[in-house]
Image (cartoon, rainbow, N blue to C red):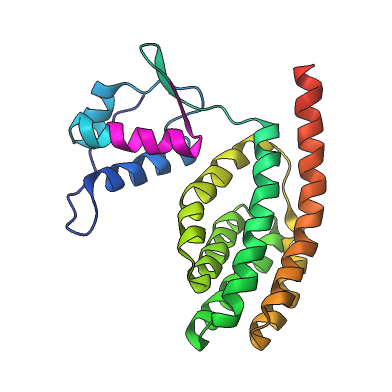
Amino acid sequence: MPVPKSTVENSPRKLLRDVVLEKMLAAIQDGTLQAGERLNDDELVQWLGVSRTPIREAIAKLVDYGLVEMEANRYTRVATPTGKQAADTTQVLGGFVELAARWGVPKLDASAAKALTEHLEAVRSYSEQQDKRMDAELETVISLLVDAADNELLDKFAESLLPRARFLSLAQGAWQFWDYKHSVDPLRAAIAKRDGDAAAAAIRALTTTAEQQADELRAAGTAAAG
């Protein structure tokens, strides 16, 4: 594993384990830590500039998220995403975003509605360009909907679901879902009216196609396993 200069800073607003978790999440998602790579305590201590305790706490979270695999006295390694895992997560994510939209859109204030529509326009633009930056904008849209829903359980679920969805997108290979641009106008209209049911319906229409592609991924994974 490459050992770059430590960039972890002590923060009065965050537990050290959370700062370490953010750094390790970013490293997994940008490929610094690659699928299947073993995680060595000494290398992580040198890289992150912290003791083993916050590192082990962060790794425990990553195991919960499904991004790291661990077997006592044998290995701790970055998980290898599969098509089936990506398909399963896509289905769960679709239902999750529907709930966030149904509950969150009616609660949007003017500022939050403006921010949400701006990010939706960025989704449209990147989708039309087939630009992978669309993924980050989509995650921002989801996070804004979750924030607006103001539901503690949704917040907690998002903490593990969104990083897992981002990580498992690595298993999609050449598959990209560029039809997100078609959801922008229905969602904008729903946001303007603060209509949660209409927003959820727009998400449902969008995820129907995503789930069809998820089924194809699952079938491909099953065939490969057979």
Query: Looking at the image, can residue 30 be seen?
Result: no
| Left or right: 26, with 189 as reference point | left
Position of residue 112 in the picture relative to residue 216 (left or right): left
Q: Position of residue 164 (x, y in %)?
A: 54, 43
Judge whether 141 appears above or below 225 on screen. Answer: below
Which quadrant of the view contains residue 103? bottom right
Residue 43's spot in the image, x, y percent?
27, 24
What's the magenta bit mostly, secondary-structure-wise?
helix
Q: Position of residue 60 (x, y in %)?
A: 37, 34
Residue 207 to residue 59: above or below: below
Q: How many marks?
A: 0
Residue at point 59%, 55% (across, down): 135
Residue 183 in picture, x, y percent from top left: 74, 68
Question: Compared to 28, does 150 lie above or below?
Answer: below
Point out the stretch of residues depicted in magenta: 56-70
Q: Nearer the viewer, residue 82 or 94?
A: 94
